Structure formats: structure tokens, C-alpha cells
Image: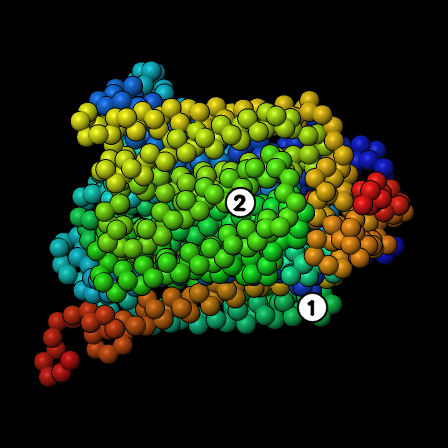
Amino acid sequence: MSHSAAHAHEAPTSTGIDHKKLIMWLFLASDCMFFGTLISTHLLYRKLYPTGFTDAEGHQQFVQKLFDIELTSFSTFILLMSSFLMALAVSAMHKGGQLKSFRRNVLGVIVFGLIFLGCQVYEFTHFYHQGLTVQNSVFGSTFYVLTGTHGTHVAIGVLWLVLLYFYSFTGKLGGHVGALDVEVAGLYWHFVDIVWIIIFTAVYLVEYLGPDGIWGNGLPPVPGVTR
Amino acid sequence: MSHDHHHAPVASRYDLAPERSDIGLIRPDRFTGWRDWLTTVDHKKIGVLYGAFAMFFFLVGGVEALGIRTQLSRPDNDFITARMYNQLFTMHGTTMIFLGVMPLSAAFFNFLVPLQIGARDVAFPRLNAFSLWTFVFGAFVLNASWLFEFAHLSGWLKSFGWYNALVYTDFAPANGWFSYAPLSGTFGQADAALRAPRFTGVGTDFWIIGIQILGIASLAASFNFICTILNMRAKGMTMMRLPVFTWMTLVTSFLIILAFPAITVALIQLMFDRQFGANFFNPSAGGQPVLWQHLFWIFGHPEVYILVLPAMGIVSEVLPTFSGKSLFGYPIIVFSGAVIGFLGFAVWSHHMFTTGLGPVPTAAFSLLTMAIAVPTGVKIFNWLGTIWGGRVRFTPPMVLSLGFIWMFMCGGFSGIMHSSAPADSQQQDSYFVIAHFHYVLLGGVLLGLMSGLYFWFPKIFGRMPKASVAYWASGLVILGFNLAFGPMHYLGLAGQPRRTHTYHAGFGWETWNYVATIGAFILGIGVFIAFANLVWTAFRGEKCSSDPWDGRTLEWSLPSPVPEYNFARSPVIACRDAFFAHKHGAHRLVYEQDGGEAGVHMPSQSWMPLLASCGFLLAGLGMPMSAMGVPHAGWVVIAGLGVLFLGIWLWALEGPGGYMLKTPVAPAPAPAEAAASR
């Protein structure tokens, strides 16, 4: 009997989808609800309290003034490009396990992921110095917990890819199973990327719709501008 | 991936030569005794462990309930303090739902699903072990709060320095099983240590982290079961030939993976409020406590169906077997189960009619709640149609399943009453609600699960529970249950509020409270006799044949106890209830030519799932202890996360392993005597 038929984990499945890929899709479906709940919480409170937050000195601060949309756009672009490299890494494994190409691309994903995380660390520090903390407002709580949870997902993804990178030197990463393992990591990475596109839109960009943002965040009136 | 570690097929795993995993450790494949149970990846053993722990926690939750009922047996009673009373009803609800019913359902999922679909194991055997041990440690973390509470009551905790700084005194959870904010949360401003003042003690922190860990266990198990059911069906086992129990497992698992994230996030938010001074539910900073209610019930209402659908699946297997007929309206039963799953996500606000949602949402949730009664009613009619005209055998499982239909319908009727918002606002927070959900969850779910235990026990252990004891236990349970919870309808409508420690004489509640307490003790004795009967049977019961009930589904085609490889050769399915058709109908069961000489591939056992779960134990105990101010407890949390990572990492590196097991070459023998006698 051939090995492929003898092993339960390599036997053909009823749906034709590998177990590992199916379970990752199921996990991602669950994670959709997870981020959906976090994003809903943020949006509900944003609608309820459109005017931002009060810093430690008691000054009213505005979300549009707080955000550094150029920096966040840059880190968003970096994360998007990391997904492109991830797709190349998966493709390299599917083309008969081209390990060199896999390593080059996955290293790019890791570096881009770290740049994204670096931007987030900088952003958090910057916001903290601007007076936004988890404790001083509902906005601070929802913002830090939502984006921080996403950052944790990215960090876990980076850790996973680092481990896969080093594992590729053991000579055990190859064949159908190796390609599948990389593809499953890729599914996770793309998902985390897509979630960020939604967060970037729902948390950042909508603050810039019209002069007051979608919530009407009540910036001080500018002479000559009709709102 | 290398396969050089696979040896020639062996007759038993104890014949294996010591085999090293990819990280150089000897695989624990040859263990016997307790080390075998700790490292097992066999879905049948994992199912038995789930069942044993669940039955234990059923008894714990039952003792907590009897404490409550003793306190309420007469007016102005002081059997227990109000503080202990709050802790008892909180832990009673939490224990019964998360440590009793859900794991007992998981026990059936584990044992039955691979057998019913003709598979040799679940899709991820080690993940299955991880789910089990994570559940066990989550249960331990939750109940560790009792150890601290008792240490506090005995005065022993006073000797510790950090104890004096504690202003919070509830060591066991005391917020009720849905832990409403702001009671469970914070108020005012966070101090320099980023802690805001809290209404309740560290018991709430035990509750938060305990439920979080139990949620992870349920999620991991559900991913595994969906994958197993969709991907590992035997040849010919199409979706519409799946046994209804397997269908309900599938629907339940989908409910779990889509509903649990809401409570996961809510718990994270509440944890941030309590540990780091965040403001999600802090009213003094603009947090909205009603958001907790929404998030909790978006999870909590599907949870109700997570509890009841497996029991409905069991009943759908028991009734046809003992009516000698196939299930009436199989596609409609399956479809109704799926509709219940969908609608279950659209009715959560009926728990919140009194919060002032406004007329439109109230009307919408009222209508949807009435609508969800339709698929449930459809199921009941189909079950009645199954019994109709059948040759009914009143065996213990059948008696309990008939009890399920009857009691569940009573609970359903009072449920429909709640769907009317004006009526509900009168019944809210009264004993009427207690009566309603105990009829659904106890008269419904517990009777269904007990029916399943009596039905499949002969398959699990190859031994038959004593019928006379089983009838007595069933009778006591049904009698005691109705005595305990029937009067609560009246008490609720007569105004007795839920969750009050005691009541004064003169409201007209004395008699029925006394009756309810007597009923609760009869019920407790009944459940205890049933469980004692089952445990005794497992070790000493009379041996029975492999198909004592004339069963319909594939598990009855196997020997009892089921061999570790399940099917010596994989069955090929030609119709619904294939084994019944094999014995009595046109279709013979045929088997694929796998297995045999080359053997069956078995997954290797592993320590790693247990190791990873230990990480949750450490982190789970460390978190509330750091909230208490125990020195260095924060490091225990970090160490726990480290152990979790280490466990998962080694798990990935050790490789799945596996070995080939020789099986009897001939296909599993058909029960010739059963076929010949008809």
C-alpha cells in the first residue's frame, strides 16, 4: 500500500479541502466575529461621543487632530505589500518547494510586519504623549484595545513566520504538507491584513469624511468655512 | 515529511518499539494506566474523560443548588449568609452551563461523531486532547475561587501580608451567571496603579479568566468537529444521510464558533476595565453598561441553543430506535435545527426588554422570538410522528426521551409567554423565569443527556445499566423536577423576585417554597442514583451484546467496547440508517478494502496538548491572584503564556507521528443472529 493511502492525514477528504486549510477557514470565520465585536464597540462609542477625549490637563482633544494619517497610510501600504510577498512565498512552495524563493519572500513579510508593528508602537507612544490613555476616555479604551488586538494578531503572525523561516533550514519543510503549512500561515496573514483595511477605513479614514469627519467631531469653527 | 519512523504493522501499540518523535523524545504510545489517559488522543477515551468530569461537576452544581433551596425552604432563614448565597447561585449557573451540560454534550460529540460518520478519529486528535485539558483546567481555575473563599472564611488568609490591602471580599464569583456590568465592572477614576475601584471582589476575576479559558476549549473543539464532520465522512455518507445527532453537533459547533467571539471580546473588555482601568462599562467615564448586556446575550442566546441542540440530536436517535420506525421527516428535522441555529442569533434582545430598547427593536425581537418557536414546534411534531404507530419499547432511554419532549414543551410554552414584551416585563427577574429556563435546561437538556447516557452506555463500556434502578432514577428525576420547578411558575407570578437571599413570611410564598425544596432534594437523589448506577455499570455492570437496542446507526455495527481503530475496514454507505437497513432492509453494508494486511494508521499519543493547557492553568490562576495583590503573581501569568507557547511549539515540531495497527482481516462481522431472527 502506498504511503499516501496509508495515512489518515493525507487521505482524500470528503470535501476535497485539506483538514488544515478547512480548520483555518473556520478559525478565520470565528475571528471575523471577534473583530466585528471590537469594531462595533468602537463605532458605537464613537457615535455616542463624537467630540474626542479630554487629556490629563483637562483640554478637549479632537480625534482628527490626534491621528497622523500620513504615517498610518504608510504602515497600511507596508502591510498590503507584505501580503503580496506572502502570496509569492506561498506560490514558491507550491511550485515544488523553491525554498530559496520562499525564504527571501517570507523574510520580506517578516520585515514588513515588523515595520508595521514599529509604526504602531510609535503611534501608541505618540498618542500617549498627546494625552490619550486607556484610562482617561472611552475613546482611549476602544482605540487601544481594538488596534492593540490587531497588533497582537500581527505579532503572532510574525512569530509564526519566523518559526517557519528557521524550520525551512531543517529540510523538513517540503512536499504537499510543507506547501500546505505555508499556505495556511498565508491565509492567516492575508486575513489579518484585510482586517486592517477595515480598521483603517472604519477607525481612521471616516474621521476625515467632510470637514468634521463622519461623526461630526466638532472641531472649532474656521472663519469663512461653511459646515 | 519523512515517514521512516513508521514501522511494520503491530497487533497492539504495546508491541511498538520505543519510537522517538522529531524532537527526540520517546512518544508516549506504549503507556498504560494514568499516563495513557493523560496523553491519549483517542476520541473515545477523550469522550469518556469529558463525561466523567462533566458528571462530577453536575454533582458539584447540584450541591450548590441544594444549598440555595435549603436557604429558601422557609422564610427569614439564615442557613447561609447573603454573601454565600450570591456566590452559590452564581457558581451554580456557571457550573451547570459551562462545566456540566456543555462538556457532557462534548462527551457525546467526541465518542459518537467519528463512529456515526464511519471515521477512525477526529480530524485533529491532538487538538482534541488540548480541548479536553483546557476545559479541565478552566474548570479548575473557576472553582479555585472556592478554595480562596474557604481559606478566607476560615481566617487562614489573614496571615498573608497582601490580604490586609484587600478591600474586596467576594473570593468566589457573585454577580450571577451573566455577570452584568456595572456590578461586575468599575466606577470612578483609575488610580496611579491603573486600577479603578470595583464593585465586586476577585471572584469576578476568577469568573472572567475561567470563562475565557473554557471558551478557548469550546472553540478548539468546535473547529475540530466541523472539520471532522465535513471532511471525514465515509464513502457514500452524504450530508443528508448523516445521523441527526451528528447534524446537531455540526449546527452546535457552528453556533459556538460564531457566538463565542462576542463573549471573548466582552470578557477582554471587562478584564481591561478591572485590571487596567479602561472604561468600556464604567458609567462614570461614559461607558455603557447596557453594551455588556448586548455583547453577553449575542453570545448568551445562541448559547441556549448550544445547550439544547445536542439533546435534541440525542432524542432524535433514541425515539426512532425504540419506536421501530425511521425518524419521521428527517430533512425537516435537520432543516429546523439549522433554522434554529440561524434565528438563534436574532433574538438576543428578548433578554433585555426592560432596558428600554424602544418600540421598534422590542417589536422586532418579540416577533423573531415567536418565530423561533416554529422550527422547535416542527421538531416536536416530527418526534410525535416518529412514535405514532410505532412498536414503542419503554426502555430507560425511551422513558427519559419522552420526558424530554413533555418537559421541554412546558418550558417552550412559558418561553412563548416571554416573547410578548409586555408580559415579559412583568415576569422579568422573577421566579417565573427560573421556572421557564429550568424546564428547558433541566427538564429538556438534562433528561435528553441522561437518555443519551443510558442509550449509549452499553456501547461505550459493553455493559448494560440495571434497568430497575434506571426506571427508579428516571421517575425520581421527573417527579422531583416537577415538584421543584412547577411551583416556581406560581411563585414568580405571585411576585417572588429572583436572586434574593431570603423573604419574609406573609407573602403567601412559604408553602410552595417548601414544596420546591422537597422536590429539589428528590431530584438530587434521583440524579445521584442515576449517576451512581452508571458509574457502577462502567466497572461492574452485566456484559451485553454489541447491539442491545437493535440500533440504527453505524456505531452499533461495531463491537462493544469499540476497538481503538473503530472500523477495521471503512464502511460504504448506501442509505440513511445504514446499519438498520443492513439488518432488516434491502441495503447490505459493504466495506472498503483499506485496513486489513497493511493495517490501520493510528495517530501517536502526545504530552504536548497537556503541556500547552497547563499554560492556561498557570495564567488563569495568576491573573486573579495578581488582582488580589499576591506578590509576583503577574510573573505567573507570563510564565503561563510561556508554557502555552512552548507546548504549542513542541507540538508542532514533534510531528504527528503515527503507527500502523493490524486489524482483523475480515470486515466487522454482521450480527448474524439479529439478521437471522427476523
The answer for how far apart the CA atoms under marks 2 and 1 are is: 44 Å
Residue B116 in the image, given as x and y percentages of width and height:
68, 49
Residue B343 in the image, given as x and y percentages of width and height:
43, 60
Rendered image quadrant of residue B548: top right
Nearer to us in this view, B537 or A202: B537
Q: Residues within 10 Å of mark 2 (few under 14, many from 20)?
A: many
Residue drawn at (60%, 42%) of the image = B108
Q: Secondary structure at mark 1?
A: helix
Residue B13 in the image, given as x and y percentages of width and height:
79, 36
Left or right, A103 with respect to B444, comes to right
Q: Which circle marks residue A48 in the picture?
A: none
Q: Amino acid at mark 2?
A: Ala
Residue drawn at (65%, 34%) of the image = B457
Task: Name the residue tied to disc 2.
Answer: B311
Left or right, B593 with respect to B207, comes to right
Q: Residues within 10 Å of mark 1 (few under 14, many from 20)?
A: some
Q: Which circle marks residue A94 in the picture?
A: 1
In which chain is the residue bearing label 1? A
Quarter of the picture holding the N terminus of chain B: bottom right
From the image, state whether disc 2 or disc 1 is nearer to you. 2
Q: Is residue B173 visible?
A: no
Residue B461 in the image, given as x and y percentages of width and height:
69, 32
Location of residue B512 with respect to B245 vertically, above or below: above
Left or right, B523 with respect to B384, comes to left
Rendered image quadrant of residue B167: top left
